Image (spheres, grey):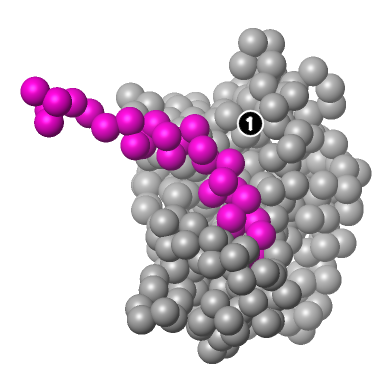
Amino acid sequence: MTANLPSPGRILEIASGYWATGLLGVATQNSLFTLIHDGATTPHALAGKTGMAPRGIQTLLDGLVGLGLLTTHHGTYHNTPEADLYLVEGKPTDISGFAQLKLAEMDRLADRLDVFTTGGPQTNPMVEVADNPHWEKVVTAIAGLSVTAAQTAAEALHLAERDHPAILDVGGGSGIFSSIWLRLNPTAHTTQLDWEPINTIAHRLLAQHSLADRFTPLNGDFHTTPLPPHTYDIALYSHIAHQESPHDNTTVFTKLRHTLKPGGTLVICDYIVDDHRTGPTFPLLFASEMLLKSNTGNTWTRTDYTTWLTQAGYTTITFHPTPTPATLITAQ
């Protein structure tokens, strides 16, 4: 009879999830995945490189094997493909900074869980404050998350084949979409509408890649900053909808339709859940982030987006999967 009972193992793993945050945070703080990528593959070598005690490094390595981020063979350790792509410093897809941000937030989380009772943050919501120093760390830490999504969007748009496309990136953050798209099409020009402190970060990234001459920062709030009519071939709204209300999303989609040229395309990238709110896992979990950090944000369903876009006047709406937990939408 007991053989048919479910195991408590998954519940134990979830309840102990703070260890996963801790393991990944410490590993990235000490460049562990980068060191392994560069050839330091034994506990002894990694202890020497990081200064960790032998017992500590072995426990860390065991935990990362348990998390599926490392494999082990005859006493050596190797990055899994996802760890090698997303956790090796210097790669454009590196999101190790995101892991460190989550580690820094962990000690404050227990005192903020009343958001489930109150329905939202009790002080200024983090995502709605323009001069929050939080942005300097966040927009650079999450840039790597958008690399493969930007490449997927470029393929869907046939961007490389277009002649002098004018692109508007709304709330563009680090400028990662602009960085990738401008390199794919040397005739393209992007305008990023975002708060001035964030545009400064983006301009720095574009300058590093010698792309700043085709990148125009437009400082302002996208809710209120006027946009010229029939100006852009493509408008991008990436990872913004989840912090906005249904009304605000519909209003912005309408505003962007008017600034697009006839036949222009709106591109949305975000964490989108299915209509029954049964998956995917990360978008469902990310809703808690929005409860904690925004007044009206959520992870919205496919039907939500279709409804808003239709109300805003778009007639062709297509959903595209990406290699990330995000989904792309193109609308015309």
Left or right: where 306 falls relative to 38: left
Q: Which of 92 and 19 is in front in this view?
A: 19
> In percent of the image, x 33 and y 24: which residue is there?
276
Amino acid at the residue labelled 1: Met
Q: In this view, does 30 lie above or below 45?
A: above
Choose top left, top right, bottom left or bottom right for residue 178.
bottom right
Any part of residue 94 in sight: no
> In percent of the image, x 54 and y 61: which residue is there?
59
Q: Split into 4 quadrants, where in the image is the N terminus?
A: top left
Q: What element carries label 1?
A: helix
Q: Nearer the viewer, residue 71 or 45?
A: 45
Q: Is residue 232 above or below residue 120?
A: below
Q: Which residue lies furthest to the top in this view?
A: 117
Q: Give the range drawn in magenta.
A: 1-28
Left or right: where 103 falls relative to 309: right
Q: Position of residue 124 (x, y in %)?
A: 84, 26
Q: State the residue position of label 1.
A: 290
> In percent of the image, x 88 and y 48: which residue is there?
133
Q: Is residue 249 above or below residue 144?
A: above
Q: Where is residue 56 in the image (x, y as percent from the top left)?
A: 62, 63
Any part of residue 110 in sight: yes
Residue 12 in the magenta stretch? The answer is yes
Q: Where is residue 26 in the image (x, y as percent from the top left)?
A: 66, 60
Q: Which of 257 and 129 is in front in this view?
A: 129
Count the labels in the image.
1
Choose top left, top right, bottom left or bottom right for residue 223.
top right
SS majority, magenta: helix
Q: Residues within 10 Å of mark 1 (few under 14, many from 20)?
A: many
> In percent of the image, x 49 and y 57: which residue is there?
63
Q: Where is residue 118 in the image (x, y as percent from the top left)?
A: 68, 11
